[in-house]
Amino acid sequence: RRSVAAGLADRPASQVARVIAQARARTDVRDLAGWVVAALRDLPDESPPESPPTRVSSSPILFHPGLSGRERQIWLNRFRAADPADRQAILDRFFTEFGHVPAS
């Protein structure tokens, strides 16, 4: 079935080959495809987990001395409403507009 193949398509070829070889070596397996699919579904996915995006702090916006209260709130709202993966881009735009502040 196409949906089964799509669901297991991300499995490494070596894992699939190993499971097929195990199924063929067993004498009690009557439905090779069914046994292989069930075994692959029972195995944990070997692909590396996605790492979360690097945490980006709102501190440069929060403590920038050149902002009015209204500007600060606008930038903080943009930053906090953004997806975590997009926060660095917002911070980069902020730095382009207002510049970096040296750490004390």
Image: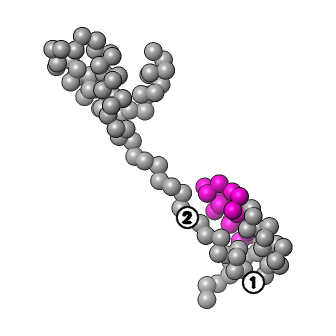
Q: Position of residue 27 (x, y in %)?
A: 15, 14
Q: Position of residue 46 (x, y in %)?
A: 35, 40
Q: Residue at position x 53%, y 61% from top? A: 54
Magenta residue span: 79-96
Q: Amino acid at mark 1?
A: Pro
> For mark 2, what is the residue?
55
Q: Position of residue 47 (x, y in %)?
A: 39, 41
Of labels 2 and 1, earlier in sequence is: 2
Q: Residue at position x 22%, y 20% from top? A: 23
**Quadrant hosting residue 33:** top left
> For mark 1, what is the residue?
65
Disc 1 crowd, CA 10 A, few/some/many (<14, 14-19, 20+): few
Q: Residue at position x 34%, y 38% from top? A: 44
- Please tell me whether mark 1 sits on a helix, a strand or a loop: loop
Res 13 seen here:
no
Q: Nearer the viewer, residue 18 or 100?
A: 18
Q: Amino acid at mark 2?
A: Arg
Q: Residue at position x 61%, y 84% from top? A: 103
Quarter placement of the C terminus: bottom right
- Please tell me whether mark 2 sits on a helix, a strand or a loop: loop
- Relative placement, left or right, of 4 versus 60 is left
- Relative placement, left or right, of 27 versus 36 is left
